[in-house]
Amino acid sequence: MPIEPPAAFSLLPWDSELFGYPVARLAPEGLRPELFPATLEQLRGQGVRLAYAQVPWSDQATRALLDGIGAPMVDRKVTFGKALTGGSIPPAGVEAWQEGEVSAELEALALASGHLSRFRTDAQVPSHVFPTLYKAWIRRSVLGEIADAVLVAREAGKLAGLVTLAQHGPVSEIGLVAVADGCRGQGIGRRLMAAAEAWSDARKAGRLEVVTQGENAAACALYRSAGCLVVQEQAIYHVWMEPVG
């Protein structure tokens, strides 16, 4: 039986429904220079209007290929990681979100966490995509579909910050992190990180990881201050097949 060649891209049903037209993710095979023109033709043939490309930051050749067709680089995706040794103590003032529904305050924090999201900064992305995506993210986190915990910090009875966590084997992953306007510079971000580490330690995770945008200087500084190191950097491109009108 002949071996099927690797797929050049994969269609993304959830993203396609959200955008209102076919969206795909390019595979490394589809980004090979000798195959890339054919990949673009296949995408157009299936009506795809947007394809995501995720490339190692150091892969200058593939980045030049995407730059050459005018695809915008929409994110410098930075992954931070920290080895956990156990025994950390949960900080005061951070608790698990106990309500079964998302409040307006919690939703506002989720939206604030994505202020530099590529779905917000790319002007070609339809305006409804970013808020719909992040509202779904926090709702599904609270329901336990994509997160195992939603931790919140409170100040004077109001929500001051949030962090969501999901454990995948020995790795605990932070999803959303945000501090409310008017509460920044008060150490709340550090408390949330300490709470995330304590939560992970309690579940015997050996590692804590979090992803952010390289342009998010405040987030990068927070993660470094918590003892996290950069373990991976990637360039994210949006390959538009045609102008969005």
Image: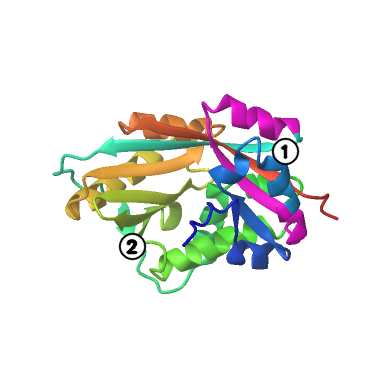
Image point (54%, 52%), residue name: 5
Above or below, 233 relative to 121: above
Residue type at mark 1: give it. Answer: Ala
Q: What is the quadrant of residue 43 in the picture?
A: bottom right
For residue 71, the mark is: 1
From mark 2 to mark 1, how far is it between C-alphas?
36 Å
Q: Residue at x 72, y 38 (%)?
A: 71
Q: Name the residue nearer the viewer: 57 or 31.
A: 31
Query: x and y percent of residue 123 in the render?
Result: 75, 45
- Residue 104, image x and y in percent? 55, 64
Is residue 19 inside the magenta stretch?
Answer: no
What residue is at 35 percent from the left and 43 percent from the top? 209
Q: Give the residue at the far left of this rendering.
A: 87
| Drawn side of residue 43 relative to residue 175, left or right | right
* Location of the C terminus (image quadrant): bottom right
Where residue 148 is drawn, which disc sits there? 2
Left or right? Give the position of 103 relative to 121: left
Is residue 41 visible in this depiction of the protein?
A: yes
Residue lying furthest right: 245
> First in sequence: mark 2 or mark 1?
1
Q: Secondary structure under badge 2?
A: loop
Visible residue check, residue 49: no
Q: Magenta region: which residues?
A: 42-68
The mark lying in front, picked from 2 and 1, is 1
| Amino acid type at image mark 2 | Asp
| Element under disc 1 | loop
Depth check: give the residue in front, 145 or 111: 145
Residue at 70%, 62% in the rendered image: 22
